[in-house]
Image (cartoon, rainbow, N blue to C red):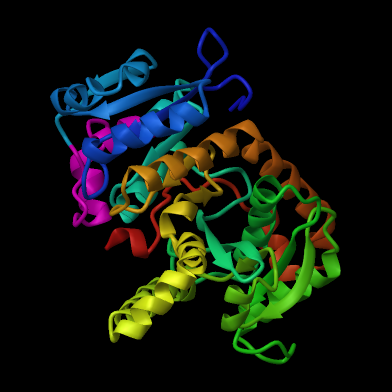
């Protein structure tokens, strides 16, 4: 796909397709979120997929957005509790989610954004867009607030388990995203492990570590193993793990943040003196609330697809949804797919000479899957 031309209107504006029905709140969040994003990026045009009556009712409040939007009516919307296989059977070709993805495939949009069912979005994206050449599976990459700023963590739940070559692919794709988000030439990359010693961890992780260490890829700086507490410290720019561990880490962090916020709220309300102390420190509390606000880093990217698909948190509000649109905008503007393709080509040159013979055979034979359903997607 020619990313420079795909999804561009006659005026050269960027088009983004939205699954307007996705998430817990549908158009009541997706439309106001799009209006906020349009204020920041006036060169966006939107393709809105979903029930036209509900979309029109919300658009009436935002005339500027209405002028920049095209509505595509669909009767079918994927529910948040549908199994991916069920969503694919019932929503293929006719749901708002599928048609929003298909707009990217047809070149009508540069990126797709949905706050809907994560599993369904992954399966539909793989069936509709397919994988980039040389990549076996997608990885869901999210922004993670850290003590020194932000890091990218992947995979946080696109698929379960990973071979060494999958972890290497994720390191390459994550570093390409980091170069866009953090504007650095060689992002530091670490493999999540149970310890930093080279002898620790399962064989797939140790093999991936060996390959990354020997390859000396030009666009990433391999920093070795990192542990769970290194994620929050921001020890590296990109943390790579398989989807099972990554999703648990993500949900644990989200739960801990809510727990700490509740502890803090209870402590403030415990006594009159505590409330007085809060008045003096409310500036610091306000900064802390901003730092921990999940809406600020909303928007996870499916890396490895032959097209840009961004997943918004299903329960977010219009502020968070607008932030996810910002992510989609940046991935297109700074040519994520091109950077990944170039980095994958360099992997072929640099990684294979240092890889084991079995991995050389496996990697050289890799091509986009004809049947892109993984074990987790069949559930």
The quadrant of the picture occupied by the N terminus is: top right
**Residue 139 point in image, percent of width and height:** 52, 57
* Residue 263 figure quarter: bottom left
Please indicate whether residue 61 sits to the left or right of residue 119 in the image. Answer: left
Work out which residue is located at the far top of the displayed protein and give it: 10
Q: Is residue 90 magenta?
A: yes
**Residue 254 point in image, percent of width and height:** 40, 71
Q: Which residues are magenta?
A: 77-101
**Residue 45 point in image, percent of width and height:** 44, 20
Please indicate whether residue 208 sits to the left or right of residue 373 in the image. Answer: right
Rendered residue at 28%/86% (across/down): 270
Rendered residue at 63%/63% (across/down): 149
Count of numbered labels shown in the rendering: 0
The quadrant of the picture occupied by the C terminus is: bottom left
Position of residue 97 relative to residue 371, above or below, is above
Rendered residue at 58%/82% (across/down): 229
The answer to whether residue 256 is visible is no
Q: Nearer the viewer, residue 215 or 288?
A: 288
Q: Nearer the viewer, residue 316 or 172?
A: 316
* Residue 261 figure quarter: bottom left
**Residue 115 point in image, percent of width and height:** 33, 46
The answer to whether residue 316 is visible is yes
């Amino acid at each position: 796909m020619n990313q420079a031309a795909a999804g561009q209107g006659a005026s050269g504006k960027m088009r983004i397709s939205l699954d307007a029905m996705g998430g817990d709140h549908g158009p009541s969040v997706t439309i106001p979120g799009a209006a906020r994003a349009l204020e920041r990026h006036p060169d966006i045009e939107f393709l809105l997929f979903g029930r036209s009556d509900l979309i029109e009712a919300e658009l009436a409040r935002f005339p500027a957005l209405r002028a920049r939007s095209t509505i595509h009516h669909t009767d079918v919307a994927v529910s948040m509790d549908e199994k991916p296989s069920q969503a694919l059977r019932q929503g293929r070709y006719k749901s708002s989610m599928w048609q929003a993805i298909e707009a990217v495939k047809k070149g009508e949009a540069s990126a797709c954004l949905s706050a809907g069912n994560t599993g369904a979005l992954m399966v539909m994206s793989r069936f509709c867009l397919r994988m980039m050449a040389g990549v076996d599976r997608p990885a869901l990459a999210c922004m993670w607030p850290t003590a020194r700023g932000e890091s990218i963590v992947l995979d946080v739940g696109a698929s379960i388990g990973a071979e060494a070559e999958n972890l290497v692919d994720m390191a390459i794709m994550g570093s390409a995203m980091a170069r866009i988000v953090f504007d650095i030439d060689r992002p530091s990359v670490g493999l999540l492990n149970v310890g930093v010693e080279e002898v620790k961890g399962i064989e797939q992780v140790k093999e991936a570590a060996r390959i990354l260490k020997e390859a000396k890829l030009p666009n990433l700086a391999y920093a070795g193993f990192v542990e769970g507490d290194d994620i929050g410290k921001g020890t590296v720019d990109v943390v790579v793990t398989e989807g099972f561990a990554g999703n648990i880490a993500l949900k644990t962090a989200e739960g801990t943040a809510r727990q700490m916020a509740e502890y803090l709220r209870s402590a403030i309300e415990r006594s009159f003196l505590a409330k007085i102390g809060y008045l003096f420190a409310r500036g610091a509390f306000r900064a802390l609330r901003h730092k921990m606000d999940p809406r600020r880093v909303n928007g996870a990217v499916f890396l490895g697809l032959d097209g840009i698909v961004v997943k918004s948190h299903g329960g977010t509000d219009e502020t968070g949804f607008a932030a996810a649109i910002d992510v989609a905008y940046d991935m297109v503007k700074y040519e994520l797919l091109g950077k990944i393709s170039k980095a994958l080509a360099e992997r072929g040159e640099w990684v294979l000479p240092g890889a084991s013979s079995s991995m050389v055979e496996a990697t050289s034979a890799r091509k986009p899957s004809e049947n892109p359903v993984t074990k987790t997607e069949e559930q």
